[in-house]
């Protein structure tokens, strides 16, 4: 979330650079964009990147560079939408388009998110079973209850403060990548030479990478959190929130670009690490959390399983609340409810009921007996298939002067937005055709 949710520094402080040195100002300006980037590397993301590196080696390293400008452009559009209109994405769609556009957009989000919640909970539970020996059937409801309780009875602020540090464990992939002595020629080739084999497996991995990197829930979350930040500094009415300054837009851009860069940096090194440690030794088909954790053995030895579990649980504790919360924001804004994590449950009962329902349905999916790693991967693929229509909506809304006034997209932003939708749609078609 924004500065107040991570470093408890409000926007008023963040937009006074003359009072700070560069580093302090930069850190103070980090907020929704950074936490969105951290949540983007959720258990589904870790699993998908691990599958890509194990199955195809360095072949998909180029996607880290390729997706960065696309995801940054779309997330920045969502941030600007929330800041300029004073509404979340669901509210902006409701205000501008008819209900036959609004509710299918929300349905796309809900389907993708609920499946993703189930996959993330299952991945966290599977990792805990690996290190404790206690069955994942106990860990899955445990994590669901803990996350739901923290969201309903405390705040996402508390979750972020407690678990954001666990995401730093992901830097273990950066260190391991170097300790594993990769083939640097192959790394450079994979980074700068786009290549997708004409096979269903290859296209499925590409769709999964695109889907877990440019995910529908991040669009709704980003816009809604910008609105939450406005509320926190006293702009409680729509009229007070509407509009933004050049300086605030610059702050948002720094925040979003930094968050997306962090997300893709970790993505790059997870693929590189699993390529150097698993693919290079013939492990090309990851079926269990234990196999995925083996990628960290050059750094942590027997502690690789604990290191992997800490990273997976930490990102899950950030990612699952974002998934459930974005469902609630979308439906609440579409239905004109009181939709805010800053409100107590008694003041926004329907909003919190959606969070609870999303968690319960996701939990139910976990008990269907699906393989946790495969479920994590296919949840990313589902996101990749469902995201293009929402990207189109985001680009159209933020290019519309009736919505954004003079803050419409630049030509570069529009090109990147349409390119994002086109690439994701083409990858999905390629998967089905092959």
Image (spheres, helix red, strand yellow):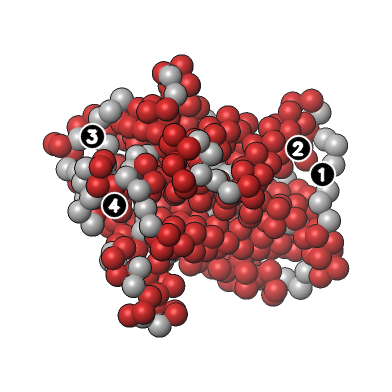
Image side of residue 44 versus residue 151, left or right: right
First in sequence, mark 3 or 1: give its number.
1
First in sequence, mark 2 or 1: give its number.
1
For disc 3, the neighbor class at 10 Å (few under 14, some 14 to 19, many from 20) is some
Q: Disc 2 and disc 3: Cα gap in Å?
A: 41 Å
First in sequence, mark 4 or 1: give its number.
1
- Circle 2 sits on which residue? 203
Relative to 258, is 357 above or below? above
Q: Disc 4 and disc 1: Cα gap in Å?
A: 43 Å
- The residue drawn where x is 71% and y is 53% is 66
Relative to 370, is 16 above or below? below
For disc 2, the neighbor class at 10 Å (few under 14, some 14 to 19, many from 20) is many
- The residue drawn where x is 75% and y is 37% is 203
- Circle 1 sits on which residue? 196
Query: Which type of secondary structure does the marked residue at label 1 adopt?
Result: loop
Say which mark, if any, is on residue 338.
3
Task: Point out the frontmost of discs 4 and 1.
Answer: 4
Query: Which type of secondary structure does the marked residue at label 2 adopt?
Result: helix
Task: Point out the frontmost of discs 3 and 1.
Answer: 3
First in sequence, mark 2 or 4: give its number.
2
- The residue drawn where x is 75% and y is 52% is 60
Which part of the image, by quadrant, shows the N terminus? Answer: bottom left
Relative to 393, is 26 above or below? below
The x, y position of residue 92, in whole percent, is: 40, 34
First in sequence, mark 4 or 3: give its number.
4
């Amino acid at each position: 979330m924004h500065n107040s949710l991570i470093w408890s520094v409000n926007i008023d402080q963040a937009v006074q650079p003359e009072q700070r040195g560069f580093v302090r100002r930069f850190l103070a300006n980090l907020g929704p964009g950074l936490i969105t980037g951290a949540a983007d590397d959720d258990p589904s993301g870790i699993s998908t990147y691990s599958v890509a590196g194990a199955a195809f080696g360095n072949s998909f390293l180029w996607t880290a560079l390729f997706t960065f400008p696309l995801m940054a452009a779309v997330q920045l559009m969502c941030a600007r939408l929330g800041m300029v209109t004073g509404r979340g994405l669901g509210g902006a769609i409701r205000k501008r388009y008819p209900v036959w556009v609004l509710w299918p957009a929300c349905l796309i989000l809900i389907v993708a998110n609920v499946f993703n919640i189930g996959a993330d909970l299952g991945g966290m539970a599977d990792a805990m079973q690996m290190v404790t020996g206690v069955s994942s059937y106990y860990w899955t409801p445990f994590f669901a209850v803990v996350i739901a309780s923290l969201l309903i009875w405390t705040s996402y602020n508390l979750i972020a403060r407690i678990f954001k540090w666990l995401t730093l464990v992901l830097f273990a992939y950066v260190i391991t990548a170097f300790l594993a002595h990769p083939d640097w020629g192959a790394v450079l080739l994979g980074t700068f030479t786009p290549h997708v084999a004409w096979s269903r497996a290859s296209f499925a991995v590409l769709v999964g990478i695109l889907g877990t990197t440019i995910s529908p829930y991040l669009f709704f979350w980003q816009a809604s959190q910008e609105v939450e930040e406005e509320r926190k500094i006293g702009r409680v009415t729509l009229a007070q929130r509407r509009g933004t300054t050049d300086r605030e837009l610059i702050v948002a851009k720094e925040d979003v670009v930094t968050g997306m860069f962090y997300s893709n940096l970790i993505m790059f090194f997870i693929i590189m690490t699993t390529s150097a440690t698993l693919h290079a030794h013939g492990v090309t088909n990851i079926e269990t959390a234990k196999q995925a954790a083996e990628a960290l053995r050059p750094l942590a030895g027997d502690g690789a399983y604990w290191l992997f579990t800490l990273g997976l649980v930490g990102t899950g504790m950030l990612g699952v609340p974002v998934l459930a919360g974005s469902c609630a924001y979308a439906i609440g804004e579409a239905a004109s409810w009181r939709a805010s994590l800053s409100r107590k449950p008694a003041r926004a009962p329907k909003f919190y009921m959606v969070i609870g329902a999303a968690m319960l349905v996701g939990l139910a999916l976990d008990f269907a007996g699906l393989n946790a790693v495969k479920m994590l991967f296919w949840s990313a693929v589902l996101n990749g298939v469902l995201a293009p229509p929402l990207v189109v909506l985001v680009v159209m809304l933020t290019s519309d002067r009736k919505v954004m006034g003079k803050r419409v997209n630049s030509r570069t932003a529009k090109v990147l937005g349409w390119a994002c939708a086109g690439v994701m749609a083409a990858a999905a078609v390629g998967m089905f055709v092959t």
